[in-house]
Image: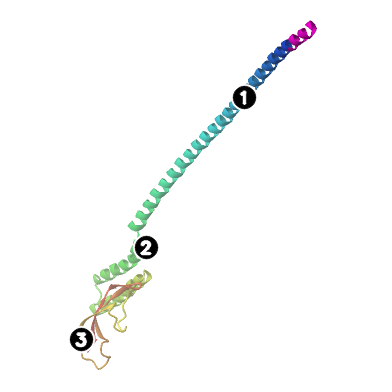
Amino acid sequence: MMLSFLRGVNLIVMSKDELKEQEVQEESQENEEVTDTTDESEIVEDVIGNDFELVQKELQELKDTYARVHADFENIKKRLEREKYTAVEYANEKFAKDMIPVMDALDGAMKSVESDADKAELFDKLKEGIELTHKQFLTQLEKHGVTMVAHDEPFDPNIHNAVQSMDSDEVESGQIVQTFQTGYKYKNRPLREAMVIVAN
């Protein structure tokens, strides 16, 4: 009887020891889990920290790139504005250069008047010089798209201005009999209407 009682106490004591051992094991496992969790959070923080530094670095690089591109754009914009201004300012330079030979011809005509040559001979030379200068002038104008409204063109209210009408057996009614003042066109746009007389 006593023996069985001792055995029961021993079992209880053993159970308590086992329970303590089991609790110690569970505590150590919990500590290990906490340690593991701590290690994982440190790893996550390290990864996030590294990614954050990379993102900051990339952001700074993008800001620098944007600043350079913006500066280049502003420089190009200013250069284009200067070129546009220059192009507008000197748009007629070619036309002006082409008019210089015409001026030279007129200068020559004026100098020929000052000579002591015979008046009849001088008149003929002057007339020839004026005709050549006129032809040269028209050639240069045509080179730049300016043309005369032809005197034999049919009446067109876009390029002709009928200032008078008269009876005529030579042309049909409404057509041009005579031109008072020559008209000019720039390409297809009238610069100045021709002033004409039309037939009744």
Mark carried by residue 165: 3
Residue 184 image-quadrant placement: bottom left
The residue pinned by badge 1 equals 39
Q: Residue at x 55, y 29 (%)?
A: 49
Q: Residue at x 38, y 70 (%)?
A: 143
The amino acid type found where label 3 is placed reads: Ser
The answer for how far apart the CA atoms under marks 3 and 1 are is: 109 Å
Local secondary structure at mark 2: helix
Q: Position of residue 98 (x, y in %)?
A: 36, 66
The amino acid type found where label 2 is placed reads: Lys
Span shown in magenta: 1-11
The answer for how far apart the CA atoms under marks 2 and 3 are is: 41 Å
Magenta span dominant secondary structure: helix
Q: Residues within 10 Å of mark 1 (few under 14, many from 20)?
A: few
Residue placed most toward the observer, 152 or 199: 199
Queried whether the magenta region covers residue 7, the answer comes back as: yes
Q: Quadrant of the N terminus?
A: top right
Mark carried by residue 181: none
Choose mark 2 or mark 3, whichever is in front.
3
Residue placed most toward the observer, 131 or 76: 76
Q: Which badge, 2 or 3, is on the more N-terminal residue?
A: 2
Q: Position of residue 34 (x, y in %)?
A: 61, 22
Local secondary structure at mark 1: helix
Choose mark 2 or mark 1, whichever is in front.
1
Q: Position of residue 160 (x, y in %)?
A: 27, 79
